[in-house]
Amino acid sequence: MTTNGSGGSGTTTSKRLTAETSEATDAFAAIESYFERGWTDGLPVVPPRPEAVEAFLDAANLQPDQILGVEPTKGAVITAEKAAINAVMAGCRPEYMPVVAAAVEAITEDQFSLHGISVSTMGAGILIVVNGPIAQELGMNDAESVFGPGNRANATIGRAVRLIVSNVLNTRAGDLDKATLGHAGKYTWCITEKVSRLPWEPLHVARGLSQDDSAVTAFAGLSGIQVGEHEANTPEGVLDAFAGRLYAVGQGMQEVLIVICPEHAAFLKSAGWSRQQVCEYLYERTKAAPPLLFEQGGVKEALNEKPPAGAGALASPDAVVPIVAGGDGGGWSTVIPMWSAGNKTRSVTKRIMA
């Protein structure tokens, strides 16, 4: 017996759950049924048995009808039961459910602009950054291939958020989702910061929470732009490489995420640079990019020229959100611009109620 992934009403064997159930002869038949109904992301899902959904709700101390969020534009309600069904389908473990619940709360805040992100041709994905003790408790990956495959918590938490958006809000590719290209982060996109290599306080602490809190921060990110810098060993040299990438993203960005690899972070840490210093340097360095930036012999040379007056790539130093993640294998970092160049969405941080 499997539970309706879209969260519709109907008969059920559980006294608490309200979602319709469907009979299937075996797991493979159930999986094929979900493909036929359009309830997957194109990959097989775990049939959500009622007892599994119950276990997820219990793990997060949630009632089935508890409202986790309401999508502001269409008014679609995401209940704990619907979120749990999709978390089971995504392959989560019950202990991941508090993270999924907090992520739903974050993406349904007005400033996140969930409807626009979900239907836009620009093709943003929802990136969840997990901070605090729960990241270590769940064994999340903060190291090699942090954006890649291989870690169950990273992969399935991000996938659960995507399935919730697709199935509960009905924003599926080719239907309401009109992304021209999209990117792989639309399947699943969830990481945690590498706390052991941070030059400063973790992201959730910078957002006003305590070190002992666990939290999620949701970003509406476009595909990342890699920043390779293997020669510089000073903060200025490393950050100039970021500045060059920021030029290519746009002007007047209100928010952009920069994911700093441990090798690059080490130079910032040894020099004692604060988070604010990094933000201010990038703001000043990216003011009014020279019009022939990439035709004048490369990014570094152009950066050394005096830029003309005018607006820069960043609206203010506060537009930069720096975090640290990744492996120690090389100097590869990433710039992740936000949907509509960061001017129509803002990241949202929520404490995880574990």
Image (cartoon, rainbow, N blue to C red):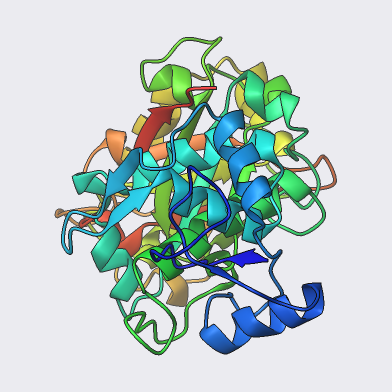
Q: Quadrant of the C terminus?
A: top right
Which residue is painted at 52% across and 42% down in the image? 100
Q: Is residue 295 above or below residue 70?
A: below
Toward the viewer: 259 or 36? Answer: 36
Q: Is residue 331 above or below residue 179?
A: above
Among the 4 quarters of the image, the one containing residue 307: bottom left
Q: Quadrant of the N terminus?
A: bottom right
**Residue 256: x percent and y percent?**
38, 49
Q: Is residue 51 above or below residue 140?
A: below
Residue 235 placement, left or right of 281: right
Which residue is painted at 58% across and 68% down in the image? 187
Toward the viewer: 121 or 55? Answer: 55
Residue 278 placement, left or right of 133: left
**Residue 200: x percent and y percent?**
55, 18
Which residue is painted at 73% across and 21% down in the image? 196
Which residue is painted at 24% across and 53% down in the image? 312
